[in-house]
Image: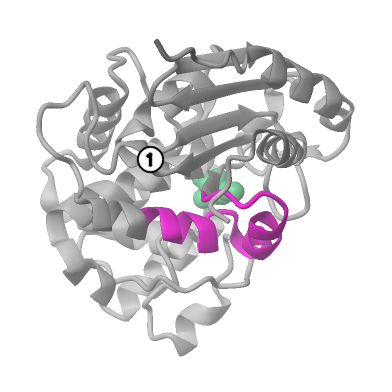
Amino acid sequence: MTTVTDFTPMLQQVLEEVRPLTLQGKVADYIPELGHVDRNKLGIALYLPDGGVFCAGDAHERFSIQSISKVFTLIMAYRRLGDALWQRVGREPSGTPFNSLIQLETDLGIPRNPFINAGALVVSDILCSQYVNAHLSILEFIRQISGVDDINFNTRVARSEAQHGYRNAAMANFIKSFGNLKAPVDDVLQTYFRQCSIEMSCAELVRAAQLLVHYGTTPDVSETLLTPSEVRRVTSIMLTCGTYDAAGDFAFRIGLPAKSGVGGGILAVVPGRMALCVWSPALDYHGNSLAGGRALELFSARSGFSVF
Ligand code: DON
């Protein structure tokens, strides 16, 4: 009989050590609704193929997944377009902040990767062409892969972002001017703002990431969602581009493919081995959770889970 290690004490210990960092950094308030979140929140969840889900702290409390949604929309678009996707968006780290417009002009409207805002807008545009109500299809897909059917949008957050999303609106219009958005700009923006406003807990996010852990299959969906080679491609982009202009530092310190969001969540995955999600709302200079990044670093060092 194989015994499964209980990782809960290690997760609790990691949270205890990073808790002082929750008082540093800045809760995102450029979307005013996000600014109300309590900076003391701190949660972590780990999914292991043979062990199920281990949780500590506020792992069951839902938060705004923001850019973590870009992993799920990338999977959906990749499923629909296959490798033709890479004619619309690159897979090169940008080295620039997530909301930068600078490279778009010289790159003729082809964003460097699907995880910067420009790239995520192109992915949302692809979904607008593929589905009648893209935002509902995104929600449905996330409910399906996580096996949780009451996951939802936060309409206040989506509205707040739409009211203050001047940079995203500028970016979408700019990409449209190069012909790399097909749907009306407003449809693309509304889809993007809504996907970012989806609320999930750490425990739900690691369940949704099972399809990457299991190379494209998941217990809640009967069909194969991605091929193993597509899974490797998605996770390689998480490693090189998932934490924006801090991706090199994340690979160096943590060694896990990861995707962050300005709601303070970071989702990390090692195909075949595990999914890990941490949430702490206060962010560092690059827009990644400060305590969350350190928690991942401590956990990967102690557990030995890493792609390196
Ligand atoms: O586009 C925005 O500003 C947000 N809805 C998403 C940004 C985000 O989460 C980037 N992450 N670090």
Q: Is residue 113 above or below residue 263?
A: below
- Residue 222 versus residue 123: which sits nearer the camera? 222
Q: Residue at point 38% right, 38% down?
A: 195
Residue 58 appears in the picture as rendered = no
User: In the drawing, does residue 151 fall left or right of residue 43?
Assistant: left
Coloration mode:
one colour
Q: Which residues are magenta?
A: 234-257
The correct choice, above or below, for 82 with respect to 164 in the image is below
In this rendering, the answer to whether 26 lies above or below 79 is above
Q: Please name whichever residue, 246 or 222, is drawn nearer the observer in this view of the structure.
A: 222
Residue 212: percent from left, percent from top:
34, 41
The quadrant of the image that shows the N terminus is top left
Screen quadrant of the C terminus? bottom right
The x and y percentages for residue 128 are 20, 51
Could you tell me which residue is drawn at 78 percent across and 53 percent down?
285
| x and y, in percent, of residue 92 in the image | 47, 74
Toward the bottom, the furthest residue is 106
Q: Is residue 236 magenta?
A: yes
* Secondary structure at numbered mark 1: loop
Identity, as a three-letter code, of the amino acid under mark 1: Gly
| Residue 6 x/y as whole percent | 58, 13
Q: Quadrant of residue 139?
A: top left
Left or right: residue 32 compared with residue 168:
right
Asked whether residue 275 appears in the rendered view, the answer is yes
Q: Nearer the viewer, residue 306 or 75?
A: 306
Residue at 44 percent across and 64 percent down: it is 118
Magenta stretch prevailing secondary structure: helix
Q: Does the beta carbon at disc 1 come under 8 Å from ligand 1?
A: no
* Residue identified by numbered label 1: 272
Q: Quadrant of residue 48?
A: top left
Q: Is residue 123 left or right of residue 31?
A: left
Q: Is residue 162 left or right of residue 135?
A: right
